[in-house]
Amino acid sequence: NLASDPASFNNNNNNENTNIVGTTYSLTTTTTTGGAVGRNSIATACRLRTTAALRRKIGKNQEEVKAMELWLKQTLWYQNNKKDDKSVIIDGKDFFIQQIQPASKILYMLRTNELDTVLQYCCSNEEESTTDMVSLKARLRFLRSVLTNFAGMTKDIEMVILEALLITKNSNFGTKEMDNYFALLELTAMEFIMMKPSPAKRLQRCFGLLDILFNAVIQNNDTNNDAPSFVTAKEELLQKEVTTTFNDDNGIETTITTSFSKSLLRWIINNDFGTTTSGKRMAMALLERMNSYLILTATTTTTNLDDDDNNNYIVETIIPPKDENKRVGDDELYWIKQWKNYDRTISVPRLANLCLLTKKKLTKKQIASSFPTKQKRYQNEVLPLTNTVCNEKDWNYESFLKRQTSFEDLLHKIWGLSSASEQQQQPKRQERIDDASNSTTKKKDKKRASKSTNKKDSNTQQQLLSN
């Protein structure tokens, strides 16, 4: 009833223990900017918070109503019994103000992309450093982009984000600690997209993330220690073994079991993002995330990413796909010359060949143009990763690999994924097994050769004696 029409509630200042049903309150929920939240945000906030509180999937219609009623009763019973002063009873109005109203505001601001506003609302209890706030905003922006474009796989993470922001508002956790937690949420979102677990497994993983968060709150309250173990949880996820199937540099489908860190890096680097609409959206989110990091860590920059649902950005392939039906012109001759020794069809849709641009639309002629022509357009772009492409004299396979390596290093800095330098220092497990196997084989061959020589010598001696 509270969620159905919040604007219709009237004033009622009595403190009697009343039920929500049949009682009217002046509880019109508005954001800090004065905009009305609306019934959808309030209803969704109720459902998400109920799911988090009861730790189970909430069905629709009657089951949803019963679950919310159970959460309400449990909360009121607990709060009224833990108080020293029993004369003042906490009722449905207090429940709405404490549990629903802040969640509705945060959810509405997240969904309308008011990220600066939601951070000011949740982090107003202390002086926060600008760097931590900008970093947390970049993580929220990436999560929001993933939630919007891959809702089917990541919708349960919205519940965790909401609870985390509410705890940030109501506890003494700083943005530094929550930045580590939201890095864990970013990795989990990409894990869901890459591994495609079942809905039940996704929900259980999200409940596990809530446990990590609430245990950190308990630890922080008990020991007065403001350093929760979010970093440890992130490292455990990165080191977890997973089995994935991917296309290698030759386009051959390969299945391998390795750490999540290496699997995720391989998926980001080798995935064909440029071939589908959903792939381009994921590429856009990743490129924007890496650009945000470069802008954040730059010593002097005036560049800022606008909060506009990525509407100002498009993804362009630097080397265009080959059009077999088109007459070979000067632009195509340039690309044939630059990539004559390599299969460009494999590299075209990969992340290192994609650029984030602020132009709305490109013509077919612009997409197929040569690199020197594209350079002139890229020079006018404000995003760092697009500008760095202009430093290349030509765009060939070596340039592609160079940018790919720089992406690996960036992903290591943002999420702790295995960088190219780390992979060079530590040989792959399979390579070590092969080396050991080859060494053992050589030893066995040597032993067999020695036995064979001894046997021949023995036979020779016996023949001499016989003669």
Image: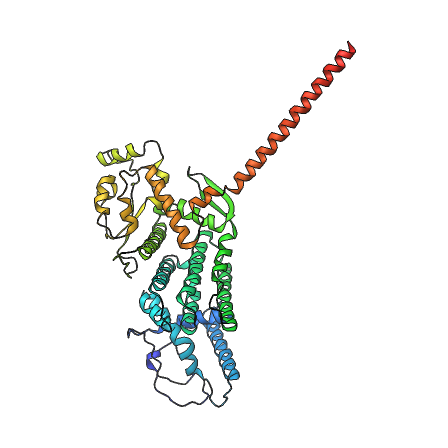
Q: Residue sitting at 27 percent across and 38 percent down?
A: 394
Q: Is residue 55 visible?
A: no
Tell which residue pokes out farthest to the top in this image: 467
Instruction: Using residue 439 as the reference point, say whether residue 267 is left or right of it.
Output: left
- Residue 73, image x and y in percent? 50, 80
Instruction: Using residue 451 as the reference point, say whether residue 250 is left or right of it.
Output: left
Q: Quadrant of the C terminus?
A: top right
Toward the viewer: 179 or 275?
179
Q: Is residue 95 visible?
A: yes
Q: Quadrant of residue 307?
A: bottom left
Tell which residue pokes out farthest to the right in this image: 466
Q: Residue sitting at 35 percent across and 48 percent down?
A: 276
- Residue 7, image x and y in percent? 32, 79
Colour theme: rainbow
- Residue 415, image x and y in percent? 42, 54
Toward the viewer: 66 or 376?
376
Q: Residue sitting at 23 percent across and 43 percent down?
A: 375
Q: Residue sitting at 47 percent across and 65 percent down?
A: 227
Instruction: Using residue 159 as the reference point, say whether residue 108 is left or right of it.
Output: left
